[in-house]
């Protein structure tokens, strides 16, 4: 067992390709001790609010996330303790009663739109990545995903993008790029950047295993 696990933060706007980057790195280490921890699972519990209030939730705002719980769980994982990861019910706009038991690993990939926004999260990361993709590509990807996977109409996706997603991206997500150690353009299609990251992670793993 190493002294403590490696934490890699992967941020970027909605539809930027950060999930593809995360999965690509994960696949390269398949068979090793690696896990993905998604910030999306840590939206705040809203069971105390009426359903009509929950419908107004802005999921692209930093205050939507329960970073206190996320930090508590990361610190447990850093001490090689298991956690019960919350599950979010998007239909009810609150946390589900279900949890997912997660065992600690040597590499933790922390992925989410705002993982670089909270200084406390940044401070525990060994590597900070920002996946940077042009806005036109991001909205096309989001539109395809929301229509296909979430049954949304084109009009509702565009309305949400222009009224919430875009302003939140410009105000909160884009500025976190300055905290990144590495900026990866074009997401999961940037194989050179992904290979460089894999090499870097392998180096850190080797160094830590010798301590």
Image: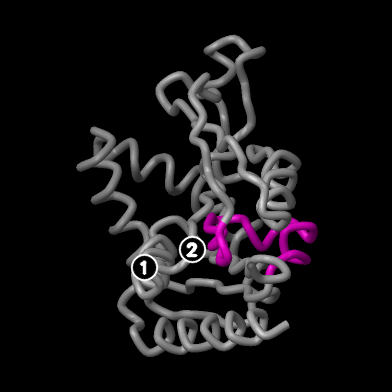
Q: Are marks 2 and 1 in contact (CB under 8 Å)?
A: yes
Residue 14 as seen in the image, left or right of residue 39: left
Q: Nearer the viewer, residue 163 or 200?
A: 200
The residue segment tinted magenta is 105-125
Magenta highlight on residue 145? no
Quarter of the image for residue 78 reads bottom right
User: Which structural element holds mark 2?
Assistant: strand
Whole-percent x, y for residue 50 in the image: 59, 9
Residue at position x 56%, y 37% from top? 85
Whole-percent x, y for residue 193 in the image: 43, 86
Q: Is residue 91 visible?
A: yes
Whole-percent x, y for residue 16 in the image: 41, 65
The N terminus lies in quadrant: bottom right
Residue at position x 68%, y 38% from top? 66
Mark 1 neighbour density, 10 Å: few (under 14) some (14–19) many (20 or more): few
Quarter of the image for residue 205 reads bottom right
**Total numbered badges shown on the rendered structure:** 2
Q: Nearer the viewer, residue 179 or 192?
A: 192
Magenta highlight on residue 115? yes
Q: Is residue 211 above or below residue 41?
A: below
User: Which structural element holds mark 1?
Assistant: loop
Residue at position x 58%, y 65% from top? 106
The C terminus lies in quadrant: bottom right
Whole-percent x, y for residue 210 in the image: 67, 85
Mark 2 neighbour density, 10 Å: few (under 14) some (14–19) many (20 or more): some
Q: Is residue 134 visible?
A: no
Residue 46 as seen in the image, left or right of residue 19: right
Residue under label 1:
30
Residue under label 2:
34
Q: Nearer the viewer, residue 42 or 131?
A: 42
Residue at position x 49%, y 30% from top? 88
In the picture, the disc for residue 69 is none
């Amino acid at each position: 067992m190493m002294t403590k696990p490696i934490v890699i933060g992967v941020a970027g706007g909605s539809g930027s390709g950060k999930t593809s980057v995360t999965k690509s790195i994960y696949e390269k280490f398949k068979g090793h001790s690696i896990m993905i921890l998604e910030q999306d699972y840590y939206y705040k519990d809203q069971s105390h609010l009426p359903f009509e209030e929950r419908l107004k939730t802005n999921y692209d705002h930093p205050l939507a996330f329960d970073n206190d719980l996320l930090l508590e769980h990361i610190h447990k994982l850093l001490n090689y303790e298991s956690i019960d990861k919350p599950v979010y019910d998007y239909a009810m706009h609150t946390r589900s009663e279900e949890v997912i038991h997660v065992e600690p690993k040597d590499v933790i990939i922390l992925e989410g739109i705002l993982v670089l926004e909270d200084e406390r999260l940044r401070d525990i990361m060994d590597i900070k990545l920002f996946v940077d993709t042009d806005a036109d590509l991001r909205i096309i990807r989001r539109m395809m995903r929301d229509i296909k996977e979430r049954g949304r109409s084109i009009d509702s996706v565009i309305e949400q993008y222009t009224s919430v997603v875009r302003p939140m991206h410009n105000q909160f997500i884009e500025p976190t790029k300055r905290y990144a150690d590495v900026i990866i353009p074009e997401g999961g299609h940037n194989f050179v950047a992904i290979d460089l990251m894999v090499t870097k992670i392998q180096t850190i793993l080797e160094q830590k295993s010798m301590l």
